[in-house]
Image (spheres, rainbow, N blue to C red):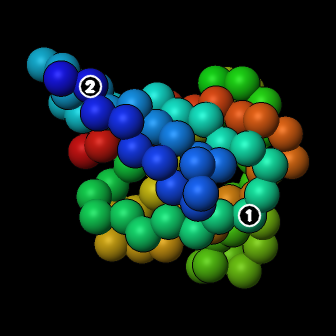
Amino acid sequence: MITVNEYFDGKVKSFVINSSEGKKTVGVMEPGEYEFDTDTKEIMTVVEGNLSVYFAEDDEWEEFEKGASFDVPAKSKLKVKVEQDTAYICEYE
């Protein structure tokens, strides 16, 4: 079964896919600034567009473009800025 999640008044939407390889989400974000809480480790890949991610340990923002991936630690906060419609895939470990 595919589940749809909506956040921030519908500006962020994701589809949950459960497969033999584990849980993944495919989503889109409209321009804006968002903060998410994570339960498990995630690997996020930008499929289209770009986004900036705030890394607290470095106290700086880093930009990720189409094709780029980054790790999100479990039990952390993910802060992102999006300047154009952006699509992504999250893989959960």
Q: Which residue is drawn at the image coordinates 30% and 43% (left, top)?
A: 92
Q: Position of residue 30 (x, y in %)?
A: 73, 44
- Viewed as shown, does residue 20 lie left or right of 54? left
Q: Secondary structure at mark 1?
A: strand
Q: Residue at x 58, y 60 (%)?
A: 8
Which residue type carries mark 2?
Ile
Q: Is residue 85 above or below residue 6?
A: above
What's the mark number on residue 2? Answer: 2
Checking the image for residue 17, the label placed there is: none
**Which label was assigned to residue 33?**
1
Q: Name the quadrant of the C terminus.
A: top left
**Is residue 65 in view?**
no
Asked if disc 2 and disc 1 are in contact, CB closer than 8 Å, the reply is no
Q: CA distance from mark 2 to mark 1?
A: 26 Å
Farthest top residue in view: 20
Quick one: 34 or 4, which is closer to the camera? 4
Q: Relative to residue 32, is residue 24 depicted above or below? A: above
Q: Residue at x 18, y 23 (%)?
A: 1
Q: Position of residue 47 (x, y in %)?
A: 64, 24
Q: Nearer the viewer, residue 90 or 73?
A: 90
Residue 65: percent from left, percent from top: 77, 34
For the view shown, which residue lies furthest in the front direction?
9
